[in-house]
Image (spheres, grey):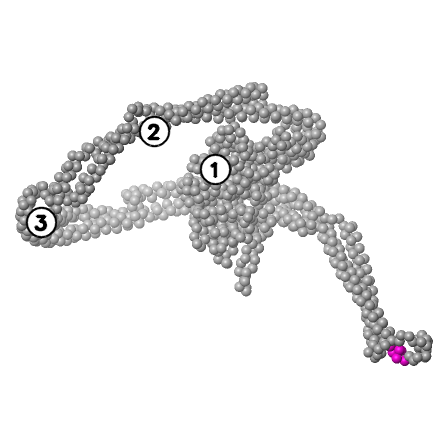
């Protein structure tokens, strides 16, 4: 996948629209993305990940948070990526879920996540616009766009982050991942489904198994031959010899180490002694220098006395100096006046000479006038050649028409040939489409049946659920009516009891002692009812309770009948659903699949009549001979027209032979005539100007003579004043017993008076300090011999070189011994496995069991294949990791002794040549971890691309990690990346490290501002 152009709108830190054109950067191979922290460098990677898979590069970032805080509310967040995949070019556009202003009401509404995918292979990149965006592949539906992209890319977002987009620390996580996590990633990257199918076929492939054994034996022999051994025994002997050599070299290295340490200690002691001797010499030299200055100090004292005397004469000296200055100024004015007069005389001479020269050129003007007359005669010649020019133009027109006719005939013939090929291709495509249409139609019919069955099942299930709901409602109503009936029954009994009590009270009022009771006939009344019958009467309440009870009984009976009917319907619908076959897939999924099949049928287009196409092909082939004859006829006419044009051109050339080539056009000739006239005008103007210049120069000469006379008078007055000042100064000098020269010498030292006083005092202090230092230094070296530091230094360097060379030989011997030992073990193990395989392949059932995981390694063939792929990854990674680590480190798969000898998972350890042992990756330093992780990520990219034809890793991105590297390691890492570029792969780096930016100038610069970040192109 090669990104060509990325467009960001309101995304992350980018407020408006930012366009990243990768073409120049991809052309450079290795490019960078630079900018300050927080400017949005990683946001470019997140935008690419979001465009392809709908998710940003970071796991902890939700897609709904990608909108820029700086963006205008009316600007929707959107990412558009145009990229190449092999020979095909795609455009994917995506918008995350976001809030936008509603069209009415001033509120906000939610914009759903949506995406589009187009094929833009046939459109130049600069012509791709929203109005011209190619053939749609999937639109709006996010799931369809993701499925189409993952199918074409050959990997999903997790694999994209591991092998294409390598954000901060993520490939280091892959380095430290456990076996299960790494197995899940590699299973998605490497298509090992073949080995599953192979497991099912092994019963019929005994012959293939035997060939594999032979190939394995040949591989063992090849590995032995590559290392120069004939047999495994020879290899074992070689490994033992390598181990002996390793011991010898290790002992030599240890001895060289001791010698180097001893030489270093001796050199250190010599340096200390040399410091004492050097200090003694320096102290003696310092004392000698101080003593040598004694005479100089005496001279300074004499200079100081003279300077003090001179300082008292400065007042009269100043008056004399000002007089000198005035005289100098007057002299300067006089000199300037003389210079001006001389310049005026020279200007006069030049002006006169210029006038004389212009007068001499008057004859050239006459010559120019004659040349102008010749040019006007050429004008007449051009007029006479117009007819021949017309004839040439006509011949040129005939030639153009003939050439155009020839091109038309050639295009017609080519079009027929192309049409013939196109129709043949259409016939082939139509035949292919017919077969695809038949297959898709059969699939559509099958899906239709399955969909109808699924719809019927869903309807029956819905009807059953509805019936269950109806039964539940009816049961609830019936239970409520039953409870209401019970309540009515209790109310009725209470009303009946109240009514009976009232009647008893009424009868008790009529009882008389000794008279018979109207109810029971008894003449004794031991407990008659008490109370007033009027207040206890309950006739109306009893009637109402009986009516309510009757109503409740009716309602309960009706709800019971309804419940029974609903339960019968439920039982019927349960039986109907049980009679239906449960669909394998939901109706919605079948509907979507059916729509996809119908879309594929629609994509094939309408059925093409092959007989019509065949007839069209016959007609085209019938026209080809006639078109060929027309092409040859047009070719002949074209050649004749070309010849006629050449003859007409020659005739025109003969007619214009007297006219220079450059003047054979009217425009050129008229321009020459105009130029000649202009030159004559310029020469006349120059003569007039020379006359005027000569007159002006004469006037300036007269004025300069007057200025010179005035300046001479002023100089005479200044000279008189100077003489008076010199007489006064001379009297003062005599009074102090000084000559002029002595005064000038002392005057120069007036400004040094304080300096001289301080120097004289400081000399005394320095002399005493130097004498004390020399005494101490002499005591320190008394009775000692001076060491030979240069010889000892050379001896130490030689010992260090010998030690380093011994280390290198010991490391090489150790590496060779380990390699041969492992190779011997590997080949011995391989031969043992081959022998076991030969025994195991006798019963083919055992082979099938072995491939399905029932083997010594307890590993399925799929997992074993992934492990083999991972070995290729480690091999490719070590091709970079070893050079980056100076040959010290390599990555290996760890042996898991807890599962038995020889069992391997996908855990990684580091082999250290310096120790000859393996250790955990966690023990590497930060810079070493970065190099290991980078090498592993690049190796993974190499193998994924090499073993999976559908995956193209044309471009990978690496985010940061360079800040943890020292300069040497950084150079090695960048050199490794340069090597990748040499393998036709582009690499993008994101970094803030200055050395990276200097080494990789191509790329993009991100600037950070308060209103959002901006992206600009960087060039070398």
The magenta-colored residue range is: 505-510
Report crowding for label 3: few under 14, some 14 to 19, many 20 or more residues within 10 A (C-alpha).
some
751 horizontally vs 971: left or right: left
Q: Which residue is mark 3?
A: 316
Residue 508 located within the stretch drawn in magenta: yes
Of helix, strand and loop, which one carries label 3? helix
Q: Nearer the viewer, residue 334 or 287?
A: 287
Q: What residue is at 83 percent from the left and 64 percent from the top?
A: 557
Q: CA distance from mark 2 to mark 3?
A: 65 Å
Q: Which residue is mark 1?
A: 927
Q: CA distance from mark 1 to mark 3?
A: 80 Å
Q: Nearer the viewer, residue 37 or 986?
A: 37
Q: What residue is at 47 percent from the left and 34 percent from the top?
A: 884
Query: Mark number for residue 272?
Result: 2
Q: Earlier in the sequence, mark 2 or mark 3?
A: 2
- Where is the C terminus found, in terms of image quarters? top left
């Amino acid at each position: 996948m090669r990104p060509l152009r990325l467009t960001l709108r309101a995304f992350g830190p980018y407020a408006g629209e930012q366009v990243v054109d990768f073409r120049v950067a991809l052309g450079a191979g290795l490019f960078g993305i630079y900018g300050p922290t927080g400017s949005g460098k990683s946001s470019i990677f997140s935008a690419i990940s979001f465009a392809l898979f709908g998710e940003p590069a970071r796991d902890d970032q939700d897609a709904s948070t990608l909108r820029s805080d700086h963006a205008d509310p009316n600007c929707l967040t959107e990412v558009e990526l145009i990229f190449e995949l092999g020979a095909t070019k795609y455009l994917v556009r995506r918008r995350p879920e976001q809030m936008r202003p509603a069209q009415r009401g001033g509120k906000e509404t939610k914009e759903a996540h949506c995406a589009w995918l187009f094929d833009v292979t046939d459109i130049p990149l600069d012509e791709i616009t929203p109005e011209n965006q190619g053939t749609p592949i999937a639109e709006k539906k996010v799931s369809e766009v993701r499925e189409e992209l993952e199918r074409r890319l050959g990997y999903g977002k997790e694999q994209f982050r591991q092998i294409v987009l390598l954000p901060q620390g993520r490939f280091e996580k892959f380095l430290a991942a456990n076996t299960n996590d790494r197995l899940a990633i590699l299973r998605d990257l490497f298509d090992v489904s073949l080995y599953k199918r192979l497991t099912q076929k092994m019963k019929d492939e005994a012959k293939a198994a035997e060939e594999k054994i032979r190939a394995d034996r040949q591989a063992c022999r090849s590995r032995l031959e590559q290392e120069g051994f004939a047999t495994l025994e020879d290899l074992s002997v070689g490994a033992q010899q390598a181990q002996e050599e390793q011991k010898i070299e290790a002992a030599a290295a240890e001895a060289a180490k001791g010698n180097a340490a001893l030489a270093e200690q001796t050199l250190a002691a010599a340096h200390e002694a040399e410091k004492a001797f050097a200090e003694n010499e320096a102290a003696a030299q310092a004392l000698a220098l101080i003593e040598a200055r004694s005479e100089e100090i005496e001279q300074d004292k004499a200079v100081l006395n003279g300077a003090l005397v001179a300082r008292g004469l400065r007042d009269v000296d100043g008056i004399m100096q000002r007089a000198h200055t005035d005289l100098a100024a007057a002299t300067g004015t006089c000199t300037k006046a003389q210079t001006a007069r001389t310049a005026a005389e020279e200007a006069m001479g030049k002006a006169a000479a210029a006038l004389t020269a212009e007068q001499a050129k008057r004859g050239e003007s006459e010559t120019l006038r004659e040349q102008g007359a010749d040019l006007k005669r050429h004008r007449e010649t051009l007029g006479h050649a117009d007819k021949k020019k017309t004839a040439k133009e006509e011949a040129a027109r005939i030639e153009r028409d003939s050439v155009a006719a020839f091109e038309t005939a050639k295009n017609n013939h080519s079009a027929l040939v192309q049409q013939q090929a196109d129709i043949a291709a259409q016939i082939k495509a139509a035949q292919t489409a017919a077969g695809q249409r038949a297959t898709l139609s059969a699939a559509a019919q099958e899906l239709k049946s399955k969909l109808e069955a699924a719809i019927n099942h869903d309807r029956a299930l819905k009807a059953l659920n509805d019936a269950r709901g109806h039964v539940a409602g009816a049961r609830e109503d019936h239970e409520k009516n039953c409870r209401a009936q019970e309540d009515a029954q209790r109310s009725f009994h209470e009303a009946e009891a109240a009514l009976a009590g009232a009647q008893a009270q009424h009868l008790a009022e009529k009882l008389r002692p000794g008279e018979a009771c109207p109810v029971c006939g008894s003449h004794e009344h031991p407990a008659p009812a008490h109370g007033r019958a009027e207040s206890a009467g309950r006739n109306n309440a009893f009637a109402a309770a009986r009516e309510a009870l009757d109503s409740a009984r009716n309602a309960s009976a009706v709800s019971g009948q309804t419940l029974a009917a609903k339960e019968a319907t439920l039982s019927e619908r349960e039986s109907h659903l049980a009679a239906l076959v449960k669909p394998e897939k939901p109706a919605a999924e079948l509907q979507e699949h059916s729509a996809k099949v119908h879309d594929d049928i629609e994509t094939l287009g309408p059925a093409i009549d092959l007989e019509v196409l065949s007839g069209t092909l016959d007609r085209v082939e019938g026209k080809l001979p006639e078109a060929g004859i027309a092409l040859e006829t047009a070719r002949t006419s074209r050649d004749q027209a070309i010849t006629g044009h050449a003859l007409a051109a020659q005739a025109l050339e003969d007619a214009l032979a007297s006219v220079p080539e450059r003047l054979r056009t009217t425009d050129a000739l008229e321009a020459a005539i105009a130029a000649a006239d202009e030159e004559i005008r310029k020469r006349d103007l120059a003569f007039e100007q020379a006359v005027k210049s000569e007159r002006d120069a004469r006037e300036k000469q007269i004025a300069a003579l007057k200025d010179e006379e005035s300046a001479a008078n002023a100089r005479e007055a200044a000279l008189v004043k100077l003489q008076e000042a010199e007489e006064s100064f001379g009297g003062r000098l005599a009074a102090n017993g000084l000559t002029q020269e002595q005064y000038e010498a002392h005057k120069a030292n007036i400004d040094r008076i304080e300096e001289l006083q301080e120097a004289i005092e400081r000399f005394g202090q320095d002399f005493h300090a130097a004498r004390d230092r020399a005494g101490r230094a002499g005591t320190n070296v008394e009775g000692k011999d001076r060491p030979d530091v240069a010889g000892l230094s050379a001896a130490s360097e030689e010992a260090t070189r010998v030690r380093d060379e011994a280390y290198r030989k010991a490391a090489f011997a150790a590496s060779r011994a380990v390699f041969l030992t492992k190779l011997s073990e590997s080949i011995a193990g391989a031969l043992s496995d081959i022998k076991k395989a030969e025994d195991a392949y006798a019963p083919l059932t055992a082979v099938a069991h072995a491939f399905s995981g029932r083997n010594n390694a307890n590993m399925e063939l799929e997992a074993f294949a992934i492990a083999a792929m991972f070995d290729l990854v480690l091999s490719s990674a070590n091709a970079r990791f070893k050079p980056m680590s100076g040959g010290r480190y390599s990555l290996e798969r760890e042996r898991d002794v807890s599962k038995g000898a020889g069992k391997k998972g996908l855990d990684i350890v580091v082999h250290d040549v310096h120790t000859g042992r393996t250790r955990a990756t966690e023990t590497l330093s930060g810079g070493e971890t970065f190099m290991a992780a980078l090498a592993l990520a690049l190796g993974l990219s190499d193998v994924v691309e090499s073993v999976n034809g559908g995956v193209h890793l044309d471009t990978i991105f690496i985010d940061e990690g360079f800040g943890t590297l020292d300069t040497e390691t950084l150079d090695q890492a960048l050199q490794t990346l340069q090597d990748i570029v040499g393998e036709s792969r582009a690499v993008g780096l994101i970094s803030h490290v200055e050395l990276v930016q200097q080494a990789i100038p191509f790329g993009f610069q991100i600037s950070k501002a308060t209103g959002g970040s901006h992206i600009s192109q960087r060039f070398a």
